[in-house]
Image: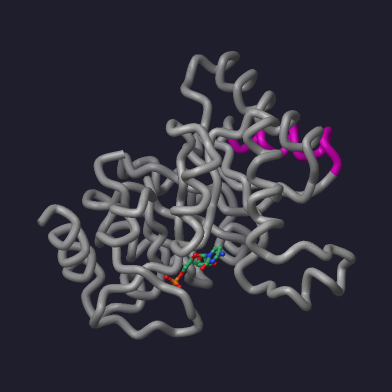
Amino acid sequence: MQNPIIAALDVPSPNQAHTLIDQIGSQIGAFKVGMELFTAAGPEIIHRIREQDAAVFLDLKFHDIPNTVAKAVASAVRLDVQMLTIHTHGGSTMMKAAENAAQETARELGTAAPLVLGVSVLTSMDQSDLQEIGLSNPVADQVERVVQLGVESGLRGFVCSPLEIERLRKIIPKETKLVTPGIRMASDAKGDQKRTKSPIEALQSGADYLVIGRPIYAAPNPSDALKRILESIEA
Ligand code: C5P
């Protein structure tokens, strides 16, 4: 990846996504394709991004029985994605199956295995949401618990909130990658993100990749917005 910025393609239609891919595809590290766009546009959108040589982060947060998740990961590798997400709450057997499927399928194809990223506790969930589903740990402890389990299961990366980076860096191997959303420049509207850091703050506290949505795709000029972000981290 040419830089650590991942632009979230959180748009509903293939046409809107194509416009963004054409506008910033040559300057971005990767595009994140989530459930909304993938359900609307299908694998074609991945091919379109790869034609621009940008990397693809397929954010479908797989969470199912190990066999099913392994097959979904293998399909994602065949689509030529460079990062994808699974839920750590699927358990260690599921996480191992996902990582193995990524490695084995990549070996068969002679390509590099994508980074299988574990999603810990969704940042939309608080203590009372955890209690509701029978988890009594404080949120931060639950995040550490499932990230630790993910490391033991062979995962090489995790998605986390910018405010969790420093705590997680203390318990994960130094080569483990951290990807963080919740990134805002001082001049950006926060939207529904409550706990944000600027791009440079997040990188300095130990993030490897930054997922940025509205500050890029909803900007009057996405290419200029991305340039300002890149300048802020280069400086
Ligand atoms: O527009 P914004 O920069 O807030 O978009 C952040 C992106 O990161 C969205 O695609 C959102 O779904 C994703 N995300 C998040 N918080 C998480 C996990 C993913 O904001 N905990």
Q: Is residue 44 above or below residue 141?
A: above
Magenta stretch: dominant SS? helix
How many tags in the picture?
0
Q: Which residues are magenta?
A: 65-76
Is residue 121 among the parts visible in the rendering? yes
Q: Residue at x 66, y 53 (%)?
A: 61
Vertical position of residue 83 compared to residue 216: above or below: above
For this view, does 132 lie left or right of residue 111?
right
Residue 110 drawn at (x, y percent): 50, 14
Residue 175, compared with residue 40, is above or below; it is above
**15 or 124: nearer the viewer:** 124
Position above or below: 39 against 114: below
What residue appears at the point 84 percent right and 71 percent down from the top-left corner?
131
The quarter holding residue 117 reads top right
Give the x, y percent position of residue 113: 52, 26
In x, y percent, where is residue 100?
68, 24
Query: In the picture, which quadrant includes the C terminus?
Result: bottom left
Q: Residue at x 48, y 68 (%)?
A: 10
Question: In the image, is 73 to the left or to the right of 109?
Answer: right
- Quarter holding the N terminus is top left
Q: Residue at x 36, y 69 (%)?
A: 197
